[in-house]
Image (cartoon, helix red, strand yellow):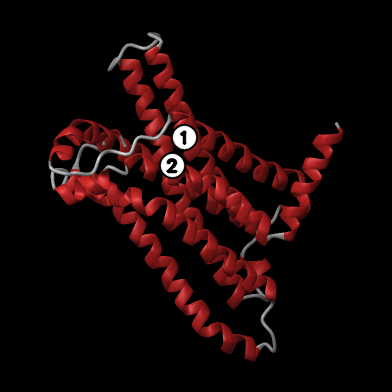
Amino acid sequence: MKHILNLYENMNSTARNNSDCPAVILPEEIFFTVSIVGVLENLMVLLAVAKNKSLQSPMYFFICSLAISDMLGSLYKILENVLIMFRNMGYLEPRGSFESTADDVVDSLFILSLLGSICSLSVIAADRYITIFHALQYHRIVTPHRALIVLTVLWAGCTGSGITIVTFSHHVPTVIAFTALFPLMLAFILCLYVHMFLLARSHARRTSSLPRANMRGAVTLTVLLGVFIFCWAPFVLHVLLMTFCPADPYCACYMSLFQVNGVLIMCNAVIDPFIYAFRSPELRVAFKKMVICSWYQ
């Protein structure tokens, strides 16, 4: 968010005077390389689902939604680096109207990436819940058509919310609302988890056996959620500290890791496709076919 980044630039020197922690500066090449890898990996996920009819099911549609979110997060950093390069070369007027508009568009991609990830993980959690507890009615309840409608509404809401957050990012209530989405999503998924894992055993006894594929999907979601929290939580905490205690020496010490937190966000887009491939035999086979076909073409 521009408000957060500008705050960081303006308060960085003041905060550093109150803290003995020097700012950790990482080479831009690291951000750019990780972002490129993230885009390519998630693009492979989208192509694998698009080219294989066996993967064109609601579950993989929701995975594609998460892949798009990850890809937007990587594109954000790539476009930001391109804008910085053009500005340094003199093609863009510093603080000009075009750069300001471009910054808003790039910031919207970043916010959209976070909102899309939150909503996609929530939808995947709901899908796993229905799979486990309504296995016999699953294909009647969760159809491809309904899944696409849900994703359309989801992304329309995320896009509108992202534009609104960037437009009013200089207001503290907007920052609070933005950061509140993170724990709300966790609370929603936690409620589903508690119900899923407390009743999974009794449900298995009633139906003789609980399909391993259903529980495998729940475990995959657990891994995805854990990686998401690990990669995004430090940035969300940074936003809160930057808003409410920018001059405090302890807050300033944590905020010196700003760029490290940024790399963690980029790494989320790189790690997720490996989780898909490791946990899904069907997707793993699709990846192998794509690599082999491209090798012999």
Contact between labelled residues 1 and 2, with CB atoms less than 8 Å apart: yes
Q: Residues within 10 Å of mark 2 (few under 14, many from 20)?
A: some
Does dot 2 land on a helix, a strand or a loop? helix
- Measured as percent of width and height from the top left, residue 26 is found at 40, 35
In the depicted view, which residue is nearer to us: 23 or 241? 23
Q: Residues within 10 Å of mark 1 (few under 14, many from 20)?
A: many
Give the residue displayed 52% in from the left and 79% down from the top: 197
- Measured as percent of width and height from the top left, residue 291 is found at 78, 41
Q: Is residue 97 above or below residue 170?
A: above
- Measured as percent of width and height from the top left, residue 156 is found at 46, 43
What residue type is disc 1 on? Phe
Does dot 1 land on a helix, a strand or a loop? helix
Q: Which residue is mark 2?
A: 263
Q: Which residue is mark 1?
A: 31
In the depicted view, which residue is nearer to us: 221 or 129? 221
Q: Is residue 256 above or below residue 189?
A: above
In the depicted view, which residue is nearer to us: 289 or 20? 20
What residue type is disc 2 on? Val
Tell whether 172 sits left or right of 148: left
Give the residue displayed 44% in from the left and 29% down from the top: 28
Q: Quadrant of residue 133?
A: bottom right
Q: Is residue 256 above or below residue 81?
A: below
Tell whether 114 sits left or right of 273: left
Q: Single out the residue that lies furthest toward the top.
A: 90
Q: Single out the residue that lies furthest toward the right.
A: 296
Q: Quadrant of residue 265?
A: top left
